[in-house]
Image (cartoon, rainbow, N blue to C red):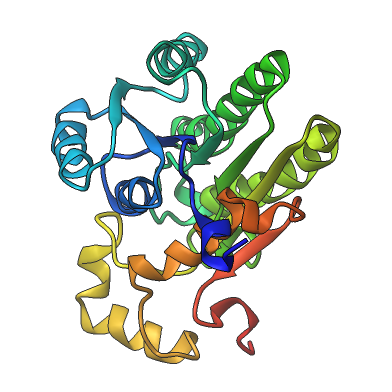
Amino acid sequence: MDVLKKFALTGKTVLVTGASSGIGAHLARVASQAGANVVLAARRVDRLEQLASDVHWLGGQSLVVKLDVTSRDSVEAAFDAAEAQFGGVDIVLNNAGIGDAQRALDISEEDWRAMQATNLDGVWRVAQCAAQRMVKSGRPGSIINVASILGLRPGTGYSHYSAAKAAVVQLSKSLALDLARHKIRVNAIAPGFFKTEMNDAYFETEKGQNYIKRAVPTERLGQLHELDGPFLLLASEAGSFITGEVIAVDGGHVINSL
């Protein structure tokens, strides 16, 4: 087989949560360019319509679904819609998430629960629903959870976020063990700092720019296209013997000296 064809997603259906912006929107386009049908899932459906137009322009097929990962009914409905349109989901990019910086002493009960509800519970809920349907239909699959380097190494002001992402790392490994016999692979991507809506304002400041130069060996933010390779590896047949792994895409940030 042509080595590049191993990375193709032709004939596959990819469901992307948090597809309305940032990493989710970008990798949805990548999946489409690789030949996949793409289910675009997020709470902000108005933004998904433009993304669906982009996918169509690229020659792909897409389905827009409103999805709240904190609701079991919403998750089930999204998978129902995907099955009705494309026959089922082969690959999940579990990307929906929220994030903000707060000192540990200032985090309220509500803020703590909201962070875990989306960034941990939501990842588990989507992964479980996907796996249950894959097993029932007898189709192999790949589940890719978006963690963070803050789940591998803590940072000041992110205890609620780091706790959720660290749990996603261990959840991914545990699911990989449980689901391997069903030919379902589960892995995680742990991005470092990429310029997205969530952090754009901070990294425009002198303080933000100085932090990147000091903390990241490559002295820059990541570009979204630098996630394409890890995503396609884990989603495609090229990564068929990879499960339970966490790939940090961070310019060396997490291995930098203290």
Q: Is residue 95 above or below residue 118?
A: below
The one nearer the camera, 108 or 156, is 156
The one nearer the camera, 226 or 32, is 32
Q: In this figure, what is the number of numbered marks?
A: 0
- Tell me the quarter of the picture where residue 20 sits: top left
Q: Residue at x 50, y 74 (%)?
A: 250
The one nearer the camera, 202 or 127, is 127
Q: How far from the left and from the top, in percent, is residue 230?
A: 54, 63
Q: Is residue 135 left or right of residue 19?
A: right
| Residue 116 in view (yes/no) | no
Q: Residue at x 79, y 33 (%)?
A: 179
Q: Is residue 82 above or below residue 215?
A: above
Q: Is residue 160 left or right of residue 182?
A: left
Q: Residue at x 47, y 8 (%)?
A: 73
Q: How far from the left and from the top, in percent, is residue 64?
A: 27, 25
| Residue 212 in view (yes/no) | yes
- Tell me the quarter of the picture where residue 159 sits: bottom right
Q: Is residue 162 above or below residue 132?
A: below
Q: Quadrant of the N terminus?
A: bottom right
Q: Is residue 107 above or below residue 23?
A: above
Q: How far from the left and from the top, in percent, is residue 69?
A: 46, 25
Q: How far from the left and from the top, in percent, is residue 3?
A: 58, 67
Q: Quadrant of the C terminus?
A: bottom right
The one nearer the camera, 192 or 7, is 7
Q: Residue at x 33, y 40 (%)?
A: 19
